[in-house]
Image (cartoon, coloured by chain):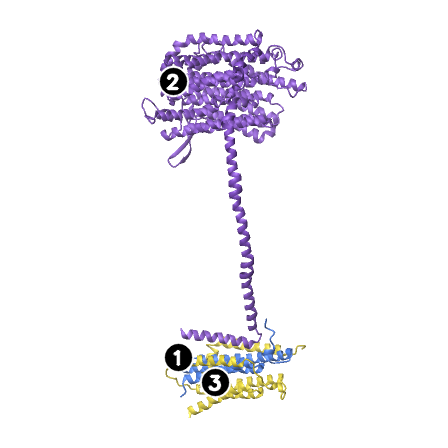
Amino acid sequence: MVTVHTLTLYGLIILFLPLVSFVYQIFFGRVLGPRGAWLSVGALAVTLVLSLTMLVSLFMGHEIAFTPEVLWFTVGDFSLTLGFQFDNISVVMLVVVAIISSLAHLYSIEYMRGDVRYTRYFGYLGLFTFSMNGIVLAHSLIMMYVFWELVGLSSYLLIGHWFEKDSAADAGKKAFLTNRVGDIGMFIGIMLLWTVTGSFTFQGLYELIDVESGNMFAGQMGLLTIAGVLVFLGAIGKSAQFPLHIWLPDAMEGPTPVSALIHAATMVAAGVYLTVRMFPILTPDALLVVGTIGAITAVLGALIAITQNDIKRVLAYSTVSQLGYMIMAVGMGAQQAAFFHLSTHAMFKGLLFLCSGSVIHALHHALVHEGDHSTDHQDMRNMGGLRSKMPITYITMLIGALTISGVPLFSGFLSKDAILAGTLAFAHEHHVWWANLFPIAGFGAAAITAFYMFRLIFMTFHGKPANAKVNAHVHESPAVMTIPLMTLAVLSFALFFTLPGLNPMSAEGWFAHLIHQMENLTGYAALSWEHLEHGFHEAHHLTVQLSFAVAGTGIMLAIVFYLLGWLSPAAWAERLKKAGLYQASFHKFYFDEIYDKVLYQPFLWLTDKIAWLDWDWWDQRFIDSWGRNTVKAGNASGWVDYFWLDQIVIDGIGRIIRWMGAVGRKMQTGRIQNYLMWALAGGLIILVLANSF
Amino acid sequence: MGDITFSVLAVLVIVTAFWVVTSRNLVHAAVALMGTLFGVAGLYVFLYADFMAAVQIIIYVGGITVLIIFGVMLTQRIGDKMLVQTTMPNRAFAAIVVAALFVALASLIFKTPWHRGDLPEMDGTVSIIGNALLTRYLLHFEVAGVLLLLALLGAAYLARRAHG
Amino acid sequence: MASLESYLFISLILFCLGLYAVMTRRNGVAVLMGIELILNAANLNLVAFNRFGGLAEHLPGQVFALFVIVMAASEAAVALAIIINLYKTFATVNVDEAHEMKW
């Protein structure tokens, strides 16, 4: 039985236990050394148990929808509260975070073994989990913003974990700074909403911004659109959406469990989570912006992923693409589908990253065993033929690939289908030509996803080994690493999201039941949802057929190219190069180069000029001239002080006094009668004066 | 009769006092001082201070003057030219100061409106002074006795021979 | 009958002459004589004030003068002792020659 109080207590424990882990690892990590990592794992296990308890109580029919809050501070009329937002979404999200985070902790015990900053790494993981739980539980935008920045910080710290490498340090900075761009927009958006409504809390905003009762923002729809888009800017940064997606692939410089936890499953999903939370107050115009950004990102990420050779970068662009899917779904009004995909994606993308980590780990050790330190252990061209050496990793990764490709029986099929159905419904409802671009983008990206995922599988596990000697030393990772793989692989089956429903084609089940509560969120969503509901039913069968087709096409193409070798990838690459397409994809559509030319270089030029102005002109000429003039004035003043004031005036006074003393001491004759005479003369003067007045 | 006597006494006092101040011979000066003190004793009689007049003659004329002459004798040899008293070089300035003081105080004396009451007749002050000293002024009397004792001791100590 | 002023005037002359002697005489004994003159001037004043102030009951002026005489006697004794000491130390009784007390 879960009461309101125990629920709040659970929330506090879930939130702060990882922080305790962080404090322990950072300040007392030496006490137990590497063994202390198990404490962090234990802490995360506790949060997992508590999260699952809350989830179970949801199954048992308890309504969990309330927001305990406490006053943080009051300034004048303004007061700020801290509080938890307990509802079905946050509970499900907590479970997702707890599962992935605890598995990543467990996995890291082996993966990070021997690392110089082992305890610090676990400390940062704890800090991240704390911050992420904070985002999930936050009841207000401002509180979410605080934790938003904290996840940014912990992401920065973890990406730069191996900061001895310049690329890792640069990637950390890039991630942090790129996120700042979005966060500034988010902050302005929050302030804009607050200025109009005076509320930070989600509940408050839902109540104060309502299209039907026309309150607060009535007549200012343009302003509300801008506010919504500005807040969404934070999601663009955090969820690596076009045009701020550039940091996520570079973030792969961090340790692989970090990539799995932060840059695949949880933190990047925070943007989607925010957008889902904001959904009820986003105007149709703002939603269109959201959907467009998502669609562009989905296609862009998928296209770039085709040509990448670094196994983690393929997965990184895949993540960008999948996040684009979710954002697009929110834009289409299918926020339930977006949240569904968020949850399933967390499982299978976490799985894929951990699998790639297992491969990298194994290959790295084999290469080191052979004395080879120069070969890139993340490059898929240096892999191949690992299937028999690492059977568990192979099978689990295959499951992950099947899931992401949208093959039935796996969870990805259901969630992706829901999103695609949403796009079809949107196109169905909006009778304009560009509305059809959304489903095209969705299905296109789905096909490409299937292709590049199986390209990855075939290049890594099939074919001939790139280096037979190294291959001989590759062996399966230990149980600490394979258990998380197997756990996540199991959770990638559709079954776990549809219980008690067993129909692999239907998403009906506990999950859909839980997130159905989101319909209660009124506002603009209510308008579009009714239309979408209709569209879903219309589009369902079409979606299933189409997604079968695209997934099959993608997988088939991958088999033809990479497994059977009927078509040569190199030859096709040459052909595409002529059209410039291959190059464009390989160079990630030149985003970094364009930013470099358009933003960084002019900025550096400007900085250079301003630095010149500041240093050469202002500092050297102006400020230093103060110094030089002060020295001159000081010299002059010193001359006056010494030769004139000191030597003449001050010493003059001394000389005068000495002269007066020389004169005056002559009165001290030592003859007592003289003294008497002077005393009498003085007395006389007093007498005369006293008489005359 | 009384006024004539008073005038004679006044002239005696002033003249002998001048002699004391101006005499170049110390012995002469001491003798002149004796005359002055006698004159003052006479003036006391005019002031109905018979006991004071007697004390003046006994102590001053009989005691202090003799003591002074002893001092002259002990420190100078009679007939030595050192006996001739010289004066300070800046006596002119001293004279100016003293003269100015004299003028100032004289003007003070004659300008002040003194209380003028009836002068009581008195016959003999000895018993009054005796009573007063042993009753009203007993403490002062005792202190004066201690002072005299100390002066006696101090003078004896100072005057004794250094090697004694 | 002589007035108060006449006594005070005689006293003033005595005082001024004594003062002059103290200031100009070199010989210590002569200085002492000047001091005796000053003291007599003061005594004369005290007795005169007693008389003309009508204080017949306890004669405070005369008693005061009496104590002054006592003091004068002891002062004369101590002063002569000092002069004798001075003579022994400096072989002179001229006060202006004993000017060790200056700068």
Closer to us: A410 or C84:
A410
Residue type, mark 1 in image: Thr
| Residue A157 falls left or right of residue B46 | right
State the residue position of label 3.
B51
Chain of the residue where label 1 is placed in the rendered structure: B
**Residue A144 found in image quarter:** top left
For the residues marked 3 and 1, what is the alpha-carbon distance in whole angstroms?
29 Å
| Residue A440 picture location, percent across and down | 44, 12
| Residue A247 seen in render | no
State the residue position of label 2.
A519
For the residues marked 2 and 1, what is the alpha-carbon distance in whole angstroms?
120 Å
| Residue A370 seen in render | yes
Report helix, strand or loop for mark 3. Answer: helix
Residue type, mark 3 in image: Phe
Residue type, mark 2 in image: Glu
Determine whether label 3 and label 1 are within 8 Å by CB. no
Closer to us: A515 or A642:
A642
State the residue position of label 1.
B112
What's the residue at 60%, 21% (across, down)? A111
Chain in yellow? Answer: B
What's the residue at 56%, 60% (across, down)? A647
Chain in purple? Answer: A
The tint of chain C in the picture is: blue
Report helix, strand or loop for mark 2. Answer: helix
| Residue C41 picture location, percent across and down | 48, 82
Q: Earlier in the sequence, mark 3 or mark 1?
A: 3
What's the residue at 51%, 43% (across, down)? A622
